[in-house]
Amino acid sequence: MKQNLQMPTNYGIEQTEKEIDLRNIFLILKRRWWIIVIFTILSTVAGYYYAENNDTPVYQYTTRLMIHASSEQIQTLLVVLKDPPILEEVIEELDLNQSPDSLANQISASVVGTSQRVNISVIDVNPERAVAIANATSAVFQKRDQKKQIMMFKLVYWSNRQYAHSR
């Protein structure tokens, strides 16, 4: 006696097919077109109203520096320009109520082409404060850069003198 064993093809799980009928979707959209138009008009009016009534002017002031260094050194100095010690001194000098990180977000520094000129730009909602921050950042940076150059000169002078005495 031969038994006929068949393997179930769906393993006991009913398969259901879902069809997307584009014609039905199109008919629904055709019947509800006015909802789409009203939503589009309301969104446009709300966006326009928001843009017109929330104008906060932002001012930018740019000052320029001349840095006598190689292009690699200038790139490093652009990073140093936004370091916390310099920005803390600017904050103290101008009596600002903000952190060095928030001040760093307002400042951008870039090299003018391939020259040794550097632009320091400050963005602020107060034009006088933008000017003051840019000028103070430039002054503090120059003061610290001069101190560093004097220290480097003393180090080189001392090294040369030590070298001359060791002969």
Image (cartoon, grey):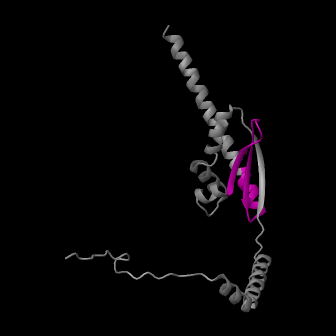
Q: Is residue 102 left or right of residue 132?
A: left
Q: Residue at x 57, y 48 (%)?
A: 85
Magenta-tinted stretch:
106-135
The image quarter in which residue 161 lies: top right
Q: Residue 4 appears at what percent x and percent y?
A: 27, 76
Of the pair 41 and 143, the residue shown nearer to us: 41
Image position of 139 (left or right of 10): right
Residue drawn at (77%, 39%) of the image: 113
- Residue 55 lies left or right of residue 151; in this view the side is right
Residue 97 picture location, percent across and down: 62, 64
Q: Which residue is pictured at 70% across the width and 47% down the height?
A: 109
**Of 20 and 108, which appears nearest the observer?**
20
For residue 37, above or below residue 73: below
The total of numbered circles placed on residues is 0
For residue 114: magenta? yes
Q: Is residue 115 magenta?
A: yes
Quadrant of the rendered image containing residue 25: bottom right
Q: Considering only vertical position in the picture, is 108 above or below 165?
A: below
Question: Does 29 sit above or below residue 124?
Answer: below
Residue 37 drawn at (x, y percent) = 77, 86
Between residue 85 and residue 105, name the one nearer to us: 105
Residue 60, given in percent of the width and then of the height, sits at: 77, 58
Looking at the rendering, which quadrant does residue 155 occupy?
Answer: top right
Q: Write the residue at 57% across / 51% down.
A: 84
Q: Residue furthest left?
A: 1
Screen quadrant of the N terminus: bottom left
Most extreme residue toward the top, as rendered?
167
Residue lying farthest to the front in this orientation: 1
- In the rendered image of this protein, does residue 90 appear above or below residue 114? below
